Image (tube, rainbow, N blue to C red):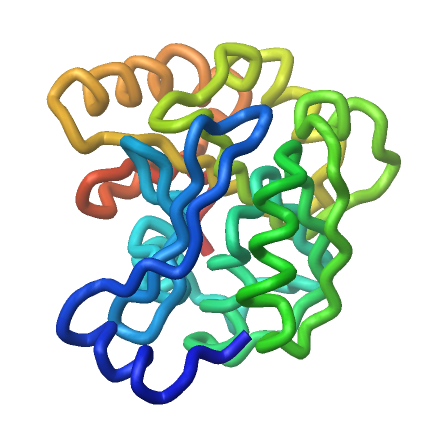
């Protein structure tokens, strides 16, 4: 849904509140328009921000997407669809997406505000991402893990078993991108410990990209 001209112009001066709802998984979900992009926020975190969702934008900018053989993309945690939005609008890439999002309210907001602006093929599935990764038989060229409840990654996604299950759903040259907060000193320390003690067990050639406030863990850099 494109905002009207006045609201869009005002968003470059101060963020415009569009909607606030509650859900079974988030006490509040705020939608703002800021700098012409829809932003999805909880009380303590930003879930989506169009092509200004810097953790993934800066990560993609460090990769050579032209050399990556990408067709099918799995998004574990969809938000307002910042990843397909930026890949299509900023990086001029058109892939086929499967978005797995447990929160029905977020799916509603994504459908209302963003999806009609995109031409990429997107299938949205309301499901627990942890269960989905064990049940699907699909193979994906790119798997993006962006799963938070407010500002915390649920513990089930932080064990070796989950990463090993992800590898079963990657194509031979597939790439995983796992977003971790690193805004505070404690967040960054926890993310670095996870990378060294868990991520590298499964992906020994993995890299940790510092993207200003987040650490993006990838199994390889292309």
Give 201 or 77, whichever is nearer the viewer. Answer: 77
Q: Which residue is the extreme one toward the right?
A: 137
Q: Tell me the quarter of the picture where residue 127 sits.
A: top right
Query: For the point 45% across and 29% down, which residue is it?
Result: 148
Residue 221, compared with residue 190, is above or below; it is: below
Measuring from the top left, give residue 47's x and y in whole percent: 41, 44
Query: For the point 43% across and 54% down, which residue is it?
Result: 19
Query: For the point 25% across and 83% down, which residue is it?
Result: 9
**Side (left or right) of 118 relative to 48:** right
Q: Tell me the quarter of the picture where residue 200 sits.
A: top left
Q: Tell me the quarter of the picture where residue 23 sits.
A: top right
Residue 17, compared with residue 45, is above or below; it is: below
Give 205 or 124, whichever is nearer the viewer. Answer: 124
**Side (left or right) of 127 relative to 180:** right
Measuring from the top left, give residue 156's x and y in whole percent: 56, 12
**Side (left or right) of 66 relative to 96:** left
Measuring from the top left, give residue 109's x and y in whole percent: 57, 54
Is there any visible trace of residue 55 in the rendered image?
Answer: yes
Measuring from the top left, give residue 6's x and y in whole percent: 30, 85
Q: Which residue is the extreme one toward the bottom?
A: 5
Q: Quadrant of the N terminus?
A: bottom right
Query: For the point 40% across and 54% down, which residue is it?
Result: 31
Is there any visible trace of residue 62 in the rendered image?
Answer: no
**Side (left or right) of 190 relative to 109:** left
- The number of numbered discs placed on residues in the rendered structure image is 0
């Amino acid at each position: 849904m494109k905002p009207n001209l006045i609201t869009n112009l005002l968003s470059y001066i101060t963020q415009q509140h569009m909607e606030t709802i509650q859900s079974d998984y988030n006490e509040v979900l705020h939608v703002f328009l800021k700098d012409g992009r829809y932003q999805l926020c909880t009380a303590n975190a930003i879930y989506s921000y169009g092509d200004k969702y810097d953790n993934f934008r800066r990560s993609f900018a460090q990769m050579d997407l032209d050399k990556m053989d990408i067709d099918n993309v799995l998004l574990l945690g969809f938000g307002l669809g910042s990843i397909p939005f930026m890949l299509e609008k900023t990086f001029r890439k058109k892939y086929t997406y499967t978005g797995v999002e447990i929160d029905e309210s977020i799916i509603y907001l994504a459908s209302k505000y963003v999806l009609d602006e995109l031409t990429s093929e997107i299938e949205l599935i309301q499901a627990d991402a942890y269960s989905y990764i064990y049940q699907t038989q699909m193979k994906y060229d790119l798997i993006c893990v962006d799963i938070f409840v407010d500002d915390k990654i649920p513990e089930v996604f932080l064990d070796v078993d989950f990463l090993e299950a992800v590898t079963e759903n990657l194509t031979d040259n597939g790439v995983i991108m796992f977003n971790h907060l690193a805004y505070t000193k404690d967040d960054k320390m926890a993310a670095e410990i996870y990378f060294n003690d868990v991520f590298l067990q499964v992906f020994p050639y993995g890299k940790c990209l510092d993207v200003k406030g987040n650490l993006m863990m990838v199994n390889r850099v292309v």
